[in-house]
Amino acid sequence: MIPNTIIVETTRRIFRDLADPQTVHNSSDESWCVPLWSALVEAGLTVAWCAEDKGGAGASLVDGFAIQRVVGEFATPIPLAETLLASWLLDQVKIKPPDGRITVAPVDDKTELTLSDDGFLTGVAERVPFARQSDHIVVIADSNDGSKIATVRSAECALWHGHNLAGESRDRVSFDGVRPAHVATDSNRVYATKLKLMGATMRAMQMTGAIEKILNMCVVYTQERIAFGRPIAKFQVIQHNLAIMAGELAAALAVTGAAANAFCNSSNSMNEVLLNVASAKIRVGEAANEVCAIAHQLHGAIGFTQEHILHCYTHRLWSWRDEYDNEAIWAVLLGNTISAHGPDELWPSLTAA
């Protein structure tokens, strides 16, 4: 499926006009954030994945993933991707997303949240993206009558500030004694898995956007940097490295597109979606390693300075690669899933993915 060009270009125009990466990087405060978020809300991009009857834009999954790729392209430290993901999850269980910025507590082995019979949460979530900048946090908690999806006001939680390698907020949040504003039941306990798959696809999309931006930066820089009387882009070794980066981008675009399409195909089983998502997270993680190394090599010393924006992208790629599990964990999961179906299903599984 092809994303809606109008939605993608609207997102790109808003970021280009209000959150140029160099301007954001040079800013001493977050004065750029308010007009940017207001423009995103006005355009309906924060609730793109919500049904129209719940105040959303009713955009397709492919459209939403394309928005997240633009988020990666501009490397702006705001929870747009997280708000989209949270709104999608709430829409699945018929909860209207609250106004404001929303994030999602990770679903992993380090997070054990429970909802008591009298309606109070207990537990701590580690490395919640943009928790301190968000108005609400969506959580998945265990209870005596199944898994619960709930919204919590961030102001009611205890927060300990943290950050990832790129400086983006990754906070420790305690939910002890907090009563959720809204609660829905996931009786089949399927949304924790779906959230992890969606989150991994989201990060892979953002990484692909960042990889594309880095390639463009390297092309421009090598055409402008003069050595021995000519642009370094004229040297064969530089051209070879740019070609490697372009190949990595092409691979990332292919696997993330396949993962997005797998979600959109309602006839796909959860295993079929998992194969595509795991392949995307693995391959994009590998591409990120290769692209970051070459980009810093091509830029030389200037690429390592705080003033240059290259590190804004490479640091995010290294950080996003580990979020919603890194490629090593997904590779084990992928191998276990395929082997569990026996040798007769190996080739059909590989060709289907």
Image (cartoon, rainbow, N blue to C red):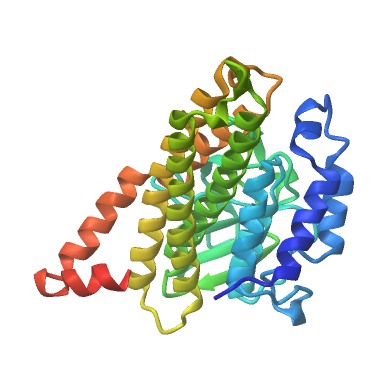
Quadrant of residue 310 within the rendered picture:
top right
x, y percentage for residue 337?
24, 63
Task: Identify which residue, 219 or 85, lies in the foreground.
Answer: 219
Tell me if I can see residue 165 in this picture: no
x, y percentage for residue 303?
60, 22
Residue shown at 54%/31% (left/top)?
Answer: 234
x, y percentage for residue 293?
45, 29
Tell me if I can see residue 139 in this picture: yes
Task: Identify which residue, 234 or 25, lies in the foreground.
Answer: 234
Task: Identify which residue, 246 or 186, lies in the foreground.
Answer: 246
Residue shown at 51%/56% (left/top)?
Answer: 199
Quarter holding the C terminus is bottom left
Residue 61 located left or right of residue 32: left
Residue shown at 42%/36% (left/top)?
Answer: 290
How many numbered badges does the structure rendering display?
A: 0
- Residue at the outermost bottom position: 267
- Residue at the outermost left position: 343
Residue 149 located left or right of residue 241: right
x, y percentage for residue 224?
67, 28
Placement of 263 over or under 101, stated as above or below: below
Placement of 79 over or under 308, stated as above or below: below
Quarter holding the N terminus is bottom right
